[in-house]
Image (spheres, rainbow, N blue to C red):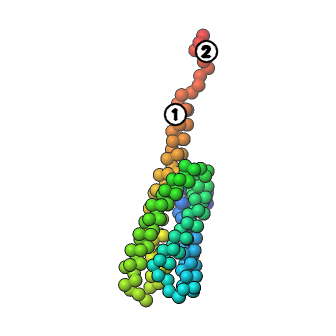
C-alpha cells in the first residue's frame, strides 16, 4: 500500500485509510444490523419500526467502538486519548442522528413500495453509506487539528534556534 500512496500528500493518504476503515466499519455495522433483523424476524415473525431501530442502534454502538480504534491507530496515526475519544464520540453522535433520520425517512418512503424491495435492508444500508461521507469530514477536523497544532509548534521552535549564549555575553 505504501508504494501506491508514497507520492500522495498526507491528506490523500489519510482519505484512503479512512475509506478502508469506513468500508470495514460499514460491513461490520451492516452485517450486525442484518443479523439482528433476521433474529427479530425469526423470533417475532414481523419486524416493525421499533425493532428495526433497535437493530440499527445496537449495530451502530458495536461498530462505533471498533471503529474508534481503527480510526485512531490506522487512519490518523494517533493514540487513544480522552480528548480524541470525546471528539470521536461527538462526531459519531452527529453521524448517528443523520443515520437514524435517514433510516426512518427511507423506511417511511420505501414502505409505500412494499414487496418491491427489502425495505429494512436497503434503508439501513443507504443511511450508513450517506452518513459515512459526512462522518469523514467531521473526524478529519477533530484528528487533524491536534496534529496541525503540533506541527505549528515544531515550526515555531525551529525558527528560534538556540544560540550559544556565552558568545553573546562576551
Q: Residues within 10 Å of mark 1 (few under 14, many from 20)?
A: few
Residue found at the far top of this picture: 170
User: Which label sits on residue 167?
Assistant: 2
Give the camera-side residue of 83 and 122: 83
Left or right: residue 80 versus residue 149 is right
Tell me: residue 41, above or below residue 67. Answer: below
Residue at x 57%, y 74% (from the top left corner): 32
Task: Identify the residue at image location x=51%, y=74%.
Answer: 54
Assess disc 2: are there few (<14), some (14-19) or many (≥20) residues with their C-alpha within 10 Å of its C-alpha.
few
**Residue 107 place in picture, x, y as percent:** 41, 78
Q: Position of residue 133 (x, y in %)?
A: 46, 63
Badge 1 marks a residue whose secondary structure is helix
Label 1, label 2: how far apart the Cα atoms are: 23 Å
The residue at the point 58 percent across, 59 percent down is: 68
Question: Can you identify the residue that label 1 sits on?
Answer: 156
Of tags 1 and 2, the one toward the viewer is: 1
Coordinates of residue 34 in the picture (x, y in percent): 55, 78
Using the image, determine if residue 3 lies above or below residue 170: below
Q: Quadrant of residue 36?
A: bottom right
Instruction: Confirm whether residue 122 shows in the render.
Output: no
Amino acid at each position: 500500500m505504501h508504494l501506491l500512496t508514497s507520492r500522495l500528500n498526507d491528506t490523500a493518504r489519510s482519505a484512503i485509510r479512512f475509506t478502508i476503515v469506513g468500508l470495514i466499519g460499514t460491513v461490520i455495522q451492516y452485517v450486525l444490523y442484518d443479523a439482528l433483523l433476521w433474529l427479530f424476524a425469526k423470533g417475532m415473525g414481523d419486524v416493525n419500526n421499533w425493532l428495526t431501530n433497535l437493530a440499527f442502534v445496537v449495530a451502530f454502538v458495536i461498530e462505533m467502538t471498533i471503529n474508534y480504534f481503527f480510526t485512531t491507530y490506522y487512519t490518523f496515526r494517533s493514540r487513544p486519548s480522552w480528548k480524541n475519544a470525546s471528539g470521536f464520540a461527538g462526531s459519531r453522535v452527529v453521524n448517528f442522528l443523520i443515520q437514524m433520520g435517514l433510516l426512518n425517512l427511507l423506511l417511511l418512503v420505501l414502505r409505500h413500495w412494499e414487496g418491491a424491495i427489502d425495505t429494512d435492508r436497503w434503508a439501513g444500508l443507504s443511511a450508513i453509506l450517506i452518513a459515512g461521507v459526512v462522518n469523514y469530514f467531521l473526524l478529519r477536523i477533530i484528528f487533524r487539528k491536534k496534529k496541525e497544532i503540533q506541527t505549528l509548534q515544531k515550526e515555531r521552535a525551529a525558527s528560534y534556534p538556540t544560540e550559544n549564549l556565552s558568545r553573546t555575553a562576551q
